[in-house]
Amino acid sequence: MSWVARRAAWRRRLRLNPLATHLVVGLVALVTVTPYLWLLSTSLKFKTELFTPTPRWIPWPINWGNYAEMFDRAPFGVFLTNTVIVVCGILAVQLVTVTLAAYVFARRRFRGSNVLFMLFLVQMMIPIHATFLPNFLTLRSLDLLNTRMAMMLPFFASGYGTFLLRQAFKQVPRELEDAAVIDGCGGPRFLWHVLIPLARPTLVAFGLISLVSHWNDYLWPLIVTDTPDVRTLTIGLGMFVQQESGADWTLLMAATVFVTAPLLLIFLVFQRKFIESFMFSGLKG
Amino acid sequence: MADSTAIASGPEVAARPISQAALWRRRLGGGSYVYLVPSLIFLIAFTYYPIGFSAYLSLFRWNVLNPERIWIGFENYAQLWREPLFWLVLRNNLFYAVGAIPTTMALGLFLAILVNQKLGRARGVYRVALFYPTMIPMVAAAMLWVWIFNPGIGLLNYYLGFLGVPRIEWLYSRHAALPAIIIMSIWKNFGYFMLIYLAALQGISADLYEAASLEGAGAWARFRAITFPLLGPTSLFVFVVAIISSFQVFDQVFVMTQGGPADQTNVLIFYIYQHAFRFWDLGMGATLTTMFIGLLLALITLVFLTVGRRVYYEGGA
């Protein structure tokens, strides 16, 4: 169905009173946004301003100092760099492993392919939460604890990514491959010159989901790191809370804003792409 | 492979004898396995080997007092069975699932239907406003909500007081701590559920609604007769994903309560974490891990037996 037809179709569906709909959705949206606005407001206040009998939404005078102080107390710049390295490292390797595996599962027939594909499917449902203890022991014996590599290694293969991309590769018609083979563009060259460009939207969707989910990882980095120089933003924030013993709210909220801001800004700029990706992906990485 | 053989069936090709090596190559899938090696290395090392390894370790006593592993058979399992805290932890997980999953799903579906209406330009704003919590790390969201749940100067108690609700101690209360965690998790997740339902709603043919309208069906009748049944597979899928992720709850507990007060918010993953990395009781940690994996595998089998056979691939989207 074309986009225009689809849109026209939406309008005929389940039509409800527009004003009431706006009211209800608007109210829920407002309630959902409130916590984050309160977070921003708190992060810009002076400590003395917190203890008001009624919540004060507009901080005045604005105190930018919390953000400066936060960088003095903990190396948030280093945390940010580490996060970017870990997240991009995971994605870079995933793109290779996932593309190769998806290619053979989608375009070739070989003995045991069903059983092997099962291994990929089941991995989707066995999260790091179920394997962190033995994986910790593995990394300890490899002497890789407290490195950025340790934070990336368990995520280098992705059953989910393989599954998504296999579906995209399957949609390329057989005739196209036959034509390519006759023109001498078979095998890996067909993958590189035809399949990958055609599956770009799926690759982008998978990339975004992978970035978001590993940006938000907590349990695994918590277990395999113990010095600030390798820690990521999420772990840095968790440690910061304990270090400041959870009482200095303006400072803690400034740190929380800093940890959430990069992804939220990227999300706001590319919201269409993000929403489409999460919408049709069915499942988070 | 079979197709390319069919194409290459001209006389000059057929006349060429196939070498023994080529035959073996074809039997082995013409090098297909090579493409799988990079993935399989990591899948085996970090998903499948750990499953076996933790099952093996669960048969040992291996803790701070016994740094050398001692074979004890199923003693760890028996010990857990007798441990009241273990049952409390499972009860907490169940409580979390029952409290969070139906509400999140209902809210997600309800908003998906509303956002799917003709809303003009506001639709984009609504989608962003409802979905943005998914983009926030759980740790940061937890931190933010610790501030909102603050009994003295927190936002929530203030506005509830406005409605006449007496002061609630939230994270410091035995009864309100787990509900508080559930509330923040609903806030964090319902937007994602909404998107999944939106995708499903857009896949329903408009003709059905038109036909129903012509027959004089009202909005509620159309929802009951068309939308609800056609969303069945999606709901089942969302439900399964939600159950699996409800057993993974950890970050918010770690930041908000550390399992307290009095273990009222201690959940399975936090319990494993405590055994493994606080008490350094690795044997018991492995036992719990094995039970968790067993639970997951049971769930997965159930999924494949029920929904699995109904999954089919079609074009589009």
Image: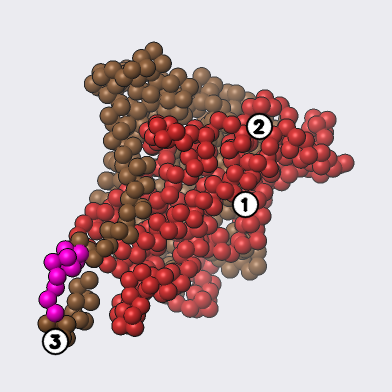
User: Are discs 1 and 3 both within one chain?
Assistant: no
- Asked which secondary structure carries label 1, the reply is helix
Give the chain of mark 2: A
Distance from disc 3 to disc 2, alpha carbons, whole Å, reads 75 Å
Which of the numbered marks, if any, corresponds to residue A263? 1
Hue used for the chain lettered B: brown
| Left or right: B153 as drawn, with respect to A132 | right
| Left or right: B244 as drawn, with respect to A78 | left
The 10 Å Cα crowd at callout 2, few under 14, some 14 to 19, many 20 or more, is many
* Residue that appears at 54% across and 47% down: A86
Give the percent coordinates (x, y) of residue B246.
Answer: 44, 39
Say whether marks 2 and 1 touch (CB < 8 Å). no
Q: Nearer the viewer, mark 1 or mark 3?
A: 3
Is A224 or B243 nearer to us in this picture? A224
The 10 Å Cα crowd at callout 3, few under 14, some 14 to 19, many 20 or more, is few
Q: Specify the amino acid type for callout 2.
A: Phe
Q: Specify the amino acid type for callout 3.
A: Pro
Q: Nearer the viewer, mark 3 or mark 2?
A: 3
User: Is residue B226 visible from the viewing direction of this image?
Assistant: yes
Which of the numbered marks, if any, corresponds to residue B277? none
* Residue that appears at 27% across and 29% down: B56
Residue A171: name its quadrant.
bottom left
User: Are discs 3 and 2 both within one chain?
Assistant: no
Residue on which disc 3 sits = B11
Confirm whether the magenta stretch covers residue A204. no
Q: Specify the amino acid type for callout 1.
A: Leu
Q: Which residues are magenta?
A: B16-27
Q: Is residue A123 above or below residue A96?
A: above
Give the chain of mark 1: A
